[in-house]
Amino acid sequence: MINVDEAINIILDGASALDAETVSLGALTGRTLAADVVARITQPPFTASAMDGYAVRFGDMAPGAQLSVVGEAPAGAPYDGAIASGEAVRILTGGVVPLGAEHVIMQEDVTREGDRITINELQKKPRNIRKAGVDFSKGDILARKAARLHDFNGSIFAAANISAVSVTRRPRVAIFSNGDELVEPGATLGPGEIVNSNHIALSAMVKSWGGAPDYLGCAADSQEAIEDFFRRARDADIIIPIGGASVGDYDYVKSAFQGAGGETLFEKIAVRPGKPTWFGKLGNTRIVGLPGNPASAIVTAALFVQPLVRRLAATQSDAPHFSNAVLTESLPANGARETYLRARGEHRDEGGVHVTPAPDQDSSLLMPFASANVLIRRAVNAPAVVVGGEVEIVRLR
């Protein structure tokens, strides 16, 4: 068996960001930029009014002064001319501020009679004008290559007159389950059958890491059926078969993988949960085989699939990021395998993150994940830790 760090290194060896593709602004969230995004125009492209009111010279703003209204400047229809002393132009929010105007007086601060306005309120300083380029200017870099895009980037790019951008292609991650005892959610269970649930969490996790999950279904317990699933998935960037990785009489996944022409690079990892996790290649496709027990599948996906998806999608740092936390319950000494415990981490007023391990760490249990947001890492042969002691954690979600 190899250790966790060795497994991650082998999985990532030779992996690099995928090629770029162009996508529309409505499909940007969660994607990674393949090139800098540069503004094509200045925003706003002209000096604009921030209020409904009158564009004026500030020197005319004495209370009681009267000005002649010489025109209008609604949004989209600029006033053709310059404002002289003693003149005002009716302007609406977003309208182009005429030449000569230094201030927009709000309509509430004046009285209008016909084509004349009277200043009713003292104006302390020039206001209510947005200068051209106050948001950004043509040629500004709005987002840099490798940035992970969020909900607001699309609007920013649109305002810069950009309709599409270049992003790293999301790795296609083909997922399939294995087992005659599995039925899909909503089905009627027969004798000895259980609901197939692992692929739901794994698909959501892959998507959150920047991948494009593709659940292919559940393969029957036969070498021929599983070989067919590998062949169907070989155009994917990553294949995740779930289950069938141990040494039972009906565990055909590894032999089916070899029958499909795959090359196995390791078969077990010294980790708990998830010892049967394995890795191989089928042409250019990387295969991370996960155990069938729910906790084993989810934990090993977080440890070994996540860095690979992130590397191919160019999203973030590849390796899991560990930090320290304060333990709220004592832990016994660890054994000969690196162990990951589901736990709940929270920031407390006294400082730092405090973590509480789930009371039952059985690898068949899903409910601990309802509250678990971190994993506690226990090194090989780590000594016992008392309440208040420090442990290493890695974010689970």
Image (spheres, helix red, strand yellow):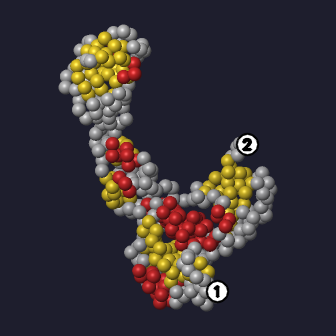
> Residue 271, can we see it?
no
61 left or right of 368? left
Q: In this view, does 230 lie to the left or right of 221?
A: left
Q: Is residue 217 left or right of residue 380?
A: left
Against 156, residue 363 (above or below) is below
Tell me how many marks there are: 2
> Spatial distance from mark 1 to mark 2, Cα to Cα?
50 Å
Q: In which quarter of the image is residue 83?
A: top left
Mark 2: which amino acid?
Glu
Taking the spot 44% from the left edge, 58% from the top edge, the residue there is: 314
Q: Which residue is drawn at 52% across and 90% down?
A: 222
**Residue at the image point whose x is 38% and y is 56% from the top:** 27
Q: Residue 339 carries which label?
A: none
State the residue in front, 20 or 149: 149
Name the image quarter holding the C terminus: bottom right
Question: Does residue 53 sit above or below 76 in this rendering?
Answer: above
Q: Is residue 43 visible?
A: yes
Q: Which disc is residue 350 wearing? A: 2
Q: What element carries label 2?
A: loop
Q: Residues within 10 Å of mark 1 (few under 14, many from 20)?
A: few
Image spot of residue 316 (x, y percent): 49, 55
Quarter location, residue 40: top left
Q: x, y (%) of residue 380?
A: 70, 66
Image position of 372 with respect to 277: above or below? above
Residue situated furthest front in the rendering: 113
318 and 49: which is toward the camera: 49
What amino acid is at disc 1?
A: Gly
> Which marked residue is nearer to the observer: mark 1 or mark 2?
1
Q: Position of 249 compared to 174: left or right?
A: right
* Residue at the disc numbered 1: 192
Disc nearer the start of the sequence (1/2): 1
